[in-house]
């Protein structure tokens, strides 16, 4: 339709004036098929010249205001800012926008701007043009100097603008702005041929014909019903004090900015301003039926305490999603980004829905907690989380990349929750509650806390890396780790550095375990390392379960107590009780090399100390029976005991399949015994293939079960002491010997042995009611040797005791009579 070949008629069915082609003089079919009435009486056909005059004086606007009351220019606005509103042939309103400024801004002021379902056209065409909503329309007479780059539609009204249909830009593409301080409501609205669209409750900031931005001090933009479709525009901006979304928004780049602000035209700058009036509950509120679907989404809320709530679906399908608010973020629906997802709030983040990103995710709750109770946080990239606390009860945090959780002095509650990373996981908090929960990484897990880590029935897992639990304040350790019924697993090294550790759970590593504690440690679960395991405590280590290592197992504490149910197993055991303290064993200790060092070593009752090589260094060793059960120290190859006082009670056993050596101390490198003990008292069994016992004072083999024996026929049994006693003080009859010193090979009894092999005499060698036997040679060097029997009387005194100072005296030569001498030649020495 040529802009100079038209007429204005009255459409009775619509109750308004319409501009139609000049050749339409009577009723005809509309697009919908209804009959359009002829022009009513009193309205003449307007010829082109008359119409041009009406336009020049703004008369068309006044005519069309009555004709189409949904869009009306503001009569109080300057003529250069009053658009003219006409209709297309199908009844769709056409807004002939005003002449743009030199900056390309067409400023149009309305008293009402409402769009019905049929839509509306903003005419940005200089010439006739085809449109999607109105078909072929005339060019806009106001655009003789060129089309607009920005079409600004300002509404001066106390009522919000109601948008129920599409707004189409006819002609050249342009940015479309609908600004109504009273608010905007969109129900099935959208934009066609708009490069950018903006719905705002702000007033435009104009400087010299340029639109610089928007001044927002109030108002709400609501998206309801049929939602907002602006998928064809590059950008969609919604700018208001508050935005309520109860339907879908479809866009490419979506920016939603709320609060009392001054916002730049491209929304890159947001300056907070003082707010007045009642504050909304949420700056951005997306209901359950609401949604935002865009390539990239940015949500900004600047009003303090006024946050963002989403119960619907917000998804950035190609780019990032950014949420920034001075209030809290509450999500009961889905927030998703194909790219990065970033949320920065000044308050709490409460998620019971889904927060997801195909790339990286950053969640920052400044001064607030992050709650993911029953919710899901997921990312294919990395997750960085910072807040004053994390509540993940029954929640899931699943990330393909790294996880970094920092809550400062706050608390991480992962009760029955899951925090799982495909890469490394780092967590720092004052306390961590992982009861019935799972904290896991395919790579390294590093957890730092200055309060408590509770892993009761929980799982702390580093599937292919190291796992570290440590106090965040190494200078003043206060961390307490509880692992009751829980599992702590590392594919590589497991490190626990804390004040306290307790629980009956499992501590597992396919590599090494290193535990450093300040307080007592009672182990009642499982500690197992494929490599080396080390447990250190400034207090007591008490073991009532299994500790094992494929390499070394090292325990170091003030006191070590391996209880009857305790098992210490490793290739090499290094068990050290420091200072003037005690090592006590009633359980099982077994290694290829077993080394025990303590001021006092007590191996009692059910205690079993095994090893290919067993070495015990102590001031005092007590290997004693308890409750009728004798303790055992047994070496498969060699047994070294370096101690000053060595006691082996009745029913107890000290045995070696190879050498048995008792001296005063252990060599620092080989852990072989050397030097002289002070005293050795044996009332049980001391047996080795070869036996060497050296003391500075005495060796006493006493009692009916007492045996010191050497089993190697080519070996030796050597006892060196100032006083050597082999006696039975308990047997009620002397018909057979009780105590025995029995060597299958050579037997030597003397005070000491020189480096050249010569012997120094003992002061006393006493063989009383006992057996002194050698299967090979026997050498005795003593100032006094007494071999006599004991007759037990009612007064328990000796009778017929015969001894010779400086000589050897035998009381009998009958082999089966105690105190006698029986020699089976050949013997080299007697």
Image (cartoon, helix red, strand yellow):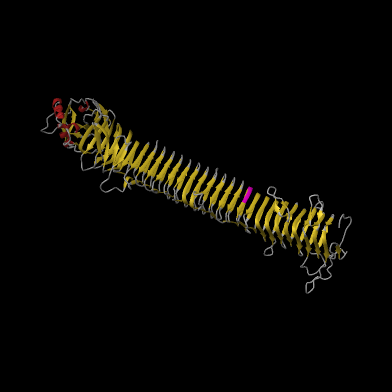
Location of residue 426 in the rendering, given as x and y in whole percent from the top left corner: 49, 45
Q: Quadrant of the C terminus?
A: bottom right
Residue that sits furthest to the left in the current view: 42
Find residue 656 and report its horizontal and vertical position in percent. Answer: 74, 54
Q: Is residue 795 left or right of residue 73?
A: right
Task: Give the image location of residue 571, x and y in percent.
Answer: 66, 48
Quarter placement of the N terminus: top left
Q: Which residues are magenta?
A: 550-554
Q: Nearer the viewer, residue 579 or 423?
A: 579
* Callout count: 0
Q: Is residue 153 visible?
A: yes
Q: Nearer the viewer, residue 15 or 412?
A: 412
Q: Is residue 394 above or below residue 256?
A: below
User: Quadrant location of residue 189?
Assistant: top left
Instruction: State the image quarter where residue 803 is shown.
Output: bottom right
**Residue 39 at x, y = what percent?**
14, 32
Residue depicted at 79% across the width and 62% down the height: 726
Q: Residue furthest bottom?
A: 794
The secondary structure that most of the magenta stretch takes on is strand
Residue depicted at 68% across the width and 47% down the height: 669
């Amino acid at each position: 339709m040529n802009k100079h070949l038209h007429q204005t008629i009255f459409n009775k069915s619509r109750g308004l004036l319409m501009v139609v082609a000049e050749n339409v003089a009577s009723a005809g079919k509309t697009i919908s098929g209804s009959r359009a009435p002829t022009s009513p009486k009193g309205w003449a056909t307007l010829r082109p010249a008359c119409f041009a005059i009406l336009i020049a004086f703004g008369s068309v606007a006044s005519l069309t205001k009555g004709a189409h009351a949904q869009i009306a220019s503001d009569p109080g606005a300057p003529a250069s800012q009053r658009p003219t509103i006409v209709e297309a042939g199908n009844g769709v309103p056409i807004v002939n926008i005003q002449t743009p400024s030199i900056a390309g801004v067409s400023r149009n002021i309305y008293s009402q701007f409402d769009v019905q379902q049929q839509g509306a056209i903003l005419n940005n065409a200089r010439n006739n043009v085809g449109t999607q909503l109105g078909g072929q329309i005339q060019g806009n007479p106001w655009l003789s100097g060129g089309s607009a780059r920005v079409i600004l539609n300002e509404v001066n009204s106390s009522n919000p603008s109601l948008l129920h249909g599409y707004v189409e830009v006819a002609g050249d593409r342009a940015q479309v702005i609908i600004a109504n301080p009273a608010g905007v409501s969109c129900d099935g609205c959208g934009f066609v041929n708009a490069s950018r669209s903006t719905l705002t409750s702000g007033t435009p900031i104009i400087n010299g014909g340029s639109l610089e931005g928007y001044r927002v001090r109030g108002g709400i933009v609501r998206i309801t019903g049929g939602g907002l479709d602006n998928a064809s525009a590059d950008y969609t901006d919604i700018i208001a004090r508050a935005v309520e979304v109860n339907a879908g928004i479809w866009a490419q780049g979506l920016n939603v900015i709320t609060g009392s602000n001054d916002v730049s035209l491209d929304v890159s700058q947001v300056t907070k301003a003082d707010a007045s009036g009642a504050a909304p509950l949420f700056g951005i509120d997306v209901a359950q039926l609401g949604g935002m679907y865009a390539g990239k989404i940015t949500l900004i809320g600047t009003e303090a305490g006024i946050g963002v709530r989403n119960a619907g679906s917000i998804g950035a399908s190609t780019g990032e999603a950014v949420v920034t608010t001075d209030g809290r973020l509450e999500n009961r629906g889905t927030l998703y980004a194909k790219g990065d997802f970033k949320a920065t709030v000044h308050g709490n983040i409460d998620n019971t829905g889904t927060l997801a990103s195909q790339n990286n995710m950053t969640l920052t709750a400044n001064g607030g907690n992050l709650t993911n109770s029953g919710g899901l946080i997921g990312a294919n990239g990395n997750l960085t989380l910072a807040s004053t606390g994390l509540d993940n009860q029954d929640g899931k945090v699943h990330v393909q990349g790294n996880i970094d959780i920092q809550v400062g002095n706050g608390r991480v509650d992962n009760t029955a929750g899951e925090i799982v990373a495909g890469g490394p996981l780092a967590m720092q908090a004052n306390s961590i509650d992982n009861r019935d929960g799972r904290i896991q990484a395919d790579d390294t897990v590093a957890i730092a806390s200055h309060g408590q880590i509770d892993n009761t029935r929980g799982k702390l897992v580093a599937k292919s890396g190291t796992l570290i639990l440590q106090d965040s304040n190494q200078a003043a350790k206060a961390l307490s780790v509880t692992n009751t019924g829980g599992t702590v697993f590392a594919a590589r090294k497991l490190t626990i550095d804390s004040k306290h550790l307790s629980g009956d759970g499992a501590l597992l590593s396919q590599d090494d375990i290193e535990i450093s504690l300040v307080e007592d440690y009672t182990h009642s679960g499982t500690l197992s390392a494929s490599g080396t395991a080390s447990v250190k405590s400034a207090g007591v280590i008490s073991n009532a379960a299994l500790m094992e290592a494929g390499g070394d197992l090292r325990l170091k504490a003030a006191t070590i107590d391996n209880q009857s149910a305790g098992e210490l197993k490793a290739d090499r055991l290094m068990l050290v009780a420091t200072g003037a303290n005690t090592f006590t064993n009633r359980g099982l200790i077994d290694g290829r090399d077993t080394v025990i060092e303590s001021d006092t070593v007590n191996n009692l009752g059910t205690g079993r100390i095994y090893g290919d090589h067993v070495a015990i260094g102590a001031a005092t060793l007590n290997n004693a029976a308890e409750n009728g059960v004798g303790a055992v120290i047994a070496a498969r190859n060699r047994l070294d005991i370096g101690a000053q006082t060595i006691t082996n009670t009745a029913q107890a056993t000290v045995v070696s399949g190879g050498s048995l050596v008792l001296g005063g101390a252990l060599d620092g490198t080989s852990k072989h015994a050397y030097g002289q003990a002070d005293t050795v008292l044996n009332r049980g069994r001391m047996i080795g293939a070869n036996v060497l016992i050296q003391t500075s004072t005495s060796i006493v083999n006493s009692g009916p079960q007492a045996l010191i024996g050497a089993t190697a026929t080519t070996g030796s049994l050597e006892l060196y002491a100032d006083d050597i006693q082999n006696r039975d003080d308990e047997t009620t009859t002397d018909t057979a010997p009780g105590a025995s010193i029995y060597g299958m090979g050579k037997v030597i009894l003397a005070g000491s042995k020189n480096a050249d092999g010569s012997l120094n005499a003992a002061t006393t060698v006493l063989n009383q009611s006992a057996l002194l036997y050698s299967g090979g040679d026997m050498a005795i060097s003593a100032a006094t040797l007494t071999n006599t029997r004991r007759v037990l009387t009612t007064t328990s005194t000796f009778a017929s005791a015969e001894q010779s100072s400086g000589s050897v005296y035998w009381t009998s030569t009958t082999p089966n009579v105690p105190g006698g001498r029986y020699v089976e030649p050949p013997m080299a020495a007697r």
